[in-house]
Image (cartoon, rainbow, N blue to C red):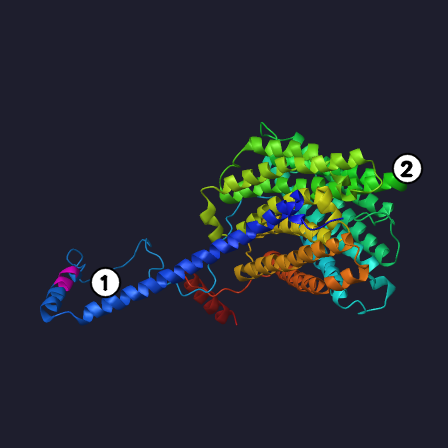
Amino acid sequence: METNNIFSESGIIITLFLILIPVLIATGILISKVYAIINKIGKKKELDRFNEYLRSLDPAEVSKLESRKKELEFSLSNTELAGDNPAEDKKGLINNINEIEGFRFIEQKRRSKPRPYVEPELTKLILWYLGCATFWLVFGTTVGEYLGIKFVAPDIDHQSWLSFGRLRPVHTNAVFWGWASLAMIGLGYYVVPRVSNTPIHSIKTGWFSLILINASVIIGSICLMAGINNSGGEYREYIWPVMLLFAIAVIISLINYVQTVAKKTTKEIYVSNWYIVAAMMYVIVISVVAYWPTWQDGLGETIVQGYYMHQGVGMWFMLFTLGLMYYFLPQQLNKPIYSYSLGILAFWTQILFYTLIGTHHFIFSAIPWWLQTVAIVGSVGMVIPVVAGTTNFLMTFKGSWHKISTSYTLPFYLIGIIFYFTGSLQGTAEAFRFTNLVWHFTDFTVAHSHLTMYGIICFMLWGFIYTLVPRLTGKEPSQVLVGAHFWFALIGLIFYTFPLMYGSTLRGLMWIDGKPFIESVELMAPYWLWRAIGGSLMWISHIIFAYNFYKMVRRNVDEEIPNSPAEILRAKQELENHGLTN
């Protein structure tokens, strides 16, 4: 097959356009910096001309300037009415008049505002969900970090239970069902009753669900490392009894959510609950379809695998997280969502098109040609919900862009939205037959999955957690460390994905040209090194996030030095009383 004119292919053009978006943004920033430098040089030249003017001043002009200077500097003594007696603030109307802001290398962000009362038991439940999710994030990505190193040093160990084939599903399933699922459900236990304006139906049910999901991930990870697996497709390596625990947990939480919504005191069901409840319903259907025994052989198994793999991402993680975004983004910006209608349009079109696209991973396979075509058409149709959702979120930002610079949570929201647009449309580009021929079975799919699951889901969940937890506990994370978490994760993701996409394109073209397979393996060596570097930065960001979460939920309180007069006097009295009792 000829590969000379790949830039005439629609999928390649779309992908290049999506990659060009952040490049253009970076170019704009660079141009603005260059303009600032040029402007600075111009100001310096202007200053030199002014200095020449100063040297040429004659005594008469200097005298006029001194006279005018005295006139402009004249001011009242401020004692004309009050006299010279010292001022005394008996009513405490003036505070901190001597406080001077010092130099800061890190810009100070705004603190979280206290929220309406949340039941202590519900707060405890949510924090346990998020705490367990944080543990599985660190555990799962530590395994992923080790796997990334294996690409660079494949002979690092010779233990069967540490082999790539066993650890890779441990990594993916731990971050899917442990990290992201627990974080979403935990946040759902806050959002669902909040937008329904009624208490959660049953807190006890939430604890049962938490225990079952943790049990499924623990047992599933042990089974996978021991070589006990479903021997099926990607992301469904857990054997069915293990996945049954997860399904039961989701079912009882879904019933809990629905019963809460049924008791709502609001007139309408807010769009967040549309997305959240629908996601809970879909993941149950997806799990049943994936593990039903009668179609686990031949082409039926392949078709089911495509369905399960894509619906798990799009109708569970994506649908649920978008529902959370429809609550947290307006709440953070203190304004309503831009368009309720766009939200409903995105909801129904995602349900219509996303459920059709699973088999676009098996273009040119033995499955029916018409089914492949339906998947491609559905993938193109996904442009509608993606553009509708992105437009809705960005237009909600309209008039509030300045808030990003004073917030340590909104940057996570914005990056998640940007990757929602670029990552999702990249999936559309991958569905075209030529691009699928080039990229399928290469690491391009790995890069794409990280752009979506990490760039969208993780960044959004981090933003939501940094928003919610300080309002439940009253404790803020270190803003410097939040910034470090953000930049390590973002830079690491770019280092991880961009080299893989480039190298995988070259690799796919080598396969089309009939080059030996081993040559394509040698070609990928430097790109796998970049993968390991990017993955290391991402893993470091997770350690920082875990520490930030610990700082937000820990019970002990730092000792604070009194600084107000009342606090100083109270401390003095306590110290004197303590001395008397001794």
Q: Nearer the viewer, residue 476 or 560?
A: 476
Residue 483 place in picture, x, y as percent: 55, 59
Q: Residues within 10 Å of mark 2 (few under 14, many from 20)?
A: few
Horizontal and vertical percent for residue 227? Answer: 88, 57
Q: CA distance from mark 1 to mark 2?
A: 91 Å
Residue 394 against residue 84 in the figure, above or below: above
Q: Which residues are magenta?
A: 68-72
Which element carries disc 2, helix, strand or loop? Answer: helix
Residue 198 shows in the view: no
User: Which residue is depicted at the point 88% across and 38% down?
Assistant: 295
Q: Quadrant of residue 273?
A: top right
Q: What is the x, y in percent for residue 465?
A: 61, 50
- Residue 294 has which mark? 2
The mark lying in front, picked from 1 and 2, is: 2
Q: Vertically, is 360 above or below 520?
A: above
Q: Amino acid at mark 2?
A: Thr
Going by the picture, which residue comes out furthest to the top? 267
Q: Is 338 left, or right, of 120 in this rendering?
A: left
Tag 2 or tag 1, which sits nearer the N-term? 1
Q: What label sits on residue 86 in the rendered view?
A: 1
Residue 389 magenta-drawn? no
Name the image quarter holding residue 87.
bottom left
